[in-house]
């Protein structure tokens, strides 16, 4: 198969023999033996060039895929025993990255001093291929794509407010009552905000007019702690303040289904030792967090 593919790619037996460091006669014998084994003519030979037959063209496409797979398998085995080295690029949401990803990053880099790492902590979905990312941590349901995803936990979308605010203005008992409260929105800059809930296993959409709209989850959290109103954030973003008593969760019975957390990577990067070792490290780290995988 390799000899046949070389003849096809080099455009002749002589060129293929030079590429493979074989005699022209050996190259010819290999192709003839392949044709006899298959019972089909693969190449049309002339004194000037070599052309595919219809069967040869189809066979070449299949052979090329097989040879590529063999090469990737060989590289993966070689990489499996190699020490991780080189530059690794990862991305994660800002607060999640600071709280959960960076401890794992530091541990990984201490273990593998020959790896340089670039961590893009941004609150947007990055395109791994277009932006050259090796690994991404994604929160939420994933669209269909050619990427590989490993689930490592889940988080909830929660509503919260400070005890002082709730003592002064009361705690809503139904999502419809939110219209009577001061709302802090951190989703996008827009005159209207729509929050979805589950009410008796049915979707409920509540349109709100926020008093404060910000583009930073940190800012929304700070405003809620200060008593400005009710904010909707992800559970990991508010756990510390809830545990300290600075915030209380409300309307928990109406929460949507939890959002999954995945480690996502490009399939063609699986063979790289630095990517594979980082994925193993981050998956183990995130799955061990009780905040992401409560018992």
Image (cartoon, helix red, strand yellow):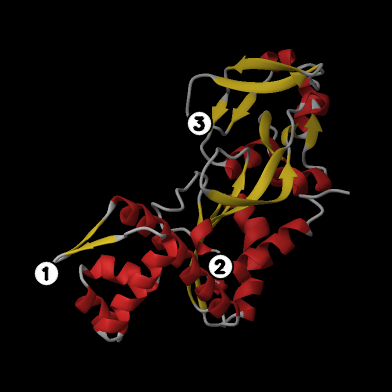
Percent coordinates x, y for residue 74 in the rendering: 52, 75
Which circle's residue, 3 or 2, is located before the other in the chain? 3
Q: Which residue is drawn at 75% across and 21% down?
A: 198
Nearer the observer, disc 2 or disc 1?
1
Q: For this rendering, which residue is in front, 50 or 239?
A: 50
Percent coordinates x, y for residue 91 in the rendering: 52, 56
Residue beneath disc 3: 188
Secondary structure of the residue carrying numbered label 1 = loop
Q: Residue at x 49, y 20 (%)?
A: 191
Q: Is residue 158 depicted above or below 253 in this figure?
A: below
Which circle's residue, 2 or 1, is located before the other in the chain? 1
Please identify the quarter of the rendering in which residue 238 is found: top right
Q: For this rendering, which residue is in front, 1 or 129?
A: 1
Q: For this rendering, which residue is in front, 77 or 85?
A: 77
Badge 3 density bin: few <14, some 14–19, many ≥20, Cα 10 Å: few
72 left or right, relative to 256: left
Q: Residue at x 66, y 73 (%)?
A: 107
Residue 32 can be seen, yes or no:
yes
Residue beneath disc 1: 47
């Amino acid at each position: 198969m390799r000899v046949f593919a070389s003849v096809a790619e080099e455009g002749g037996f002589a060129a293929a023999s030079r590429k493979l460091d074989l005699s022209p006669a050996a190259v010819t014998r290999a192709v003839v033996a392949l044709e006899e084994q298959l019972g089909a003519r693969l190449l049309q030979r002339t004194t000037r060039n070599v052309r595919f037959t219809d069967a040869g063209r189809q066979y070449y496409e299949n052979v090329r895929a097989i040879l590529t797979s063999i090469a990737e398998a060989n590289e993966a085995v070689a990489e499996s025993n190699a020490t991780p080295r080189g530059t690794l690029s990862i991305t994660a949401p800002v607060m999640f990255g600071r709280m959960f990803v960076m401890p794992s990053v530091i541990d990984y880099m201490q273990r593998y001093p020959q790896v340089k790492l670039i961590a893009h902590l941004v609150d947007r979905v990055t395109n791994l291929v277009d932006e050259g990312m090796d690994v991404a941590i994604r929160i939420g349901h994933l669209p269909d794509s050619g990427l590989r995803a490993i689930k490592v936990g889940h988080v909830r979308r929660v509503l919260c407010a400070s005890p002082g605010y709730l003592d002064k203005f009361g705690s809503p008992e139904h999502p419809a009552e939110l219209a009577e409260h001061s709302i802090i929105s951190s989703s996008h800059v827009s005159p209207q905000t729509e929050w979805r809930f589950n009410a008796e296993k049915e979707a409920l959409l509540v349109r709100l007019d926020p008093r404060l709209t910000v583009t930073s989850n940190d800012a929304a959290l700070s405003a809620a702690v200060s008593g400005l109103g009710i904010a909707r954030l992800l559970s990991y973003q508010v756990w510390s303040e809830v545990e300290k008593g600075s915030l209380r969760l409300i309307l928990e019975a109406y929460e949507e289904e939890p959002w999954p957390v995945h480690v996502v990577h490009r399939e063609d990067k699986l063979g790289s030792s630095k990517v594979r070792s980082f994925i193993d490290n981050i998956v183990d780290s995130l799955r061990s967090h009780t905040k992401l995988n409560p018992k």
